[in-house]
Amino acid sequence: MKIEIKHRVTSEVLFNFECENNTTKLTVEAAVNEGTDLRRANLYGADLTGANLTGANLNGADLNGADLNGANLTGADLTGADLREANLYGANLRGADLRGADLREANLYGANLYGANLYGANLQGVDLGFGKVDITKV
């Protein structure tokens, strides 16, 4: 089955991948492994549970409502990404660049944020496991 990752504004195909029993997770991992630039990718609501996205360029990507439970986003560029209501439970965001990202109502319970850059990120209603926080600028 062939799956395409498209630009969130222009709908231009950024990457496509075909294999038997393909999933969005497998397609995104293949794109990252090949060093594909996924800036402004439309990954709205994507199931990326446990995905290895180390070093991914997801600058400005639409990950609104995406399931990134247990995903490895070490060193990923998520600058300006839309992560509203995303599930990042137990995700590894060590050294990730989240400057200006929109994380409103995201679940960050158990996430590793060591060394992550959250400058200017919207953290309104974020769940860090000890209740929701209401921080709009870090």
Image (tube, rainbow, N blue to C red):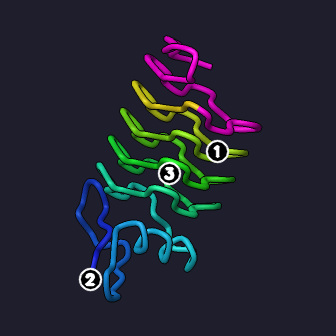
Q: Which mark is residue 93?
A: 1
Q: Sequence-wise, which precedes: disc 2 or disc 3? A: 2
Residue at the spot 52% in from the left edge and 39% down from the top edge: 89
Q: Sequence-wise, which precedes: disc 2 or disc 1? A: 2
Residue that carries the numbered disc 3 in the rendered image: 59
- Placement of 48 over or under 115, stated as above or below: below
Callout 2, which amino acid?
Lys
Which element carries disc 1, helix, strand or loop?
Answer: loop
Residue 61 image position (x, y, % from top left): 41, 51
- Of the pair 136 and 84, the residue shown nearer to us: 84
Residue numbers of the magenta segment: 110-138
Residue at the spot 62% in from the left edge and 30% down from the top edge: 118
Side (left or right) of 13 relative to 105: left
Residue that carries the numbered disc 2 in the rendered image: 2
Callout 3, which amino acid?
Asn
Residue 72 image position (x, y, % from top left): 61, 55
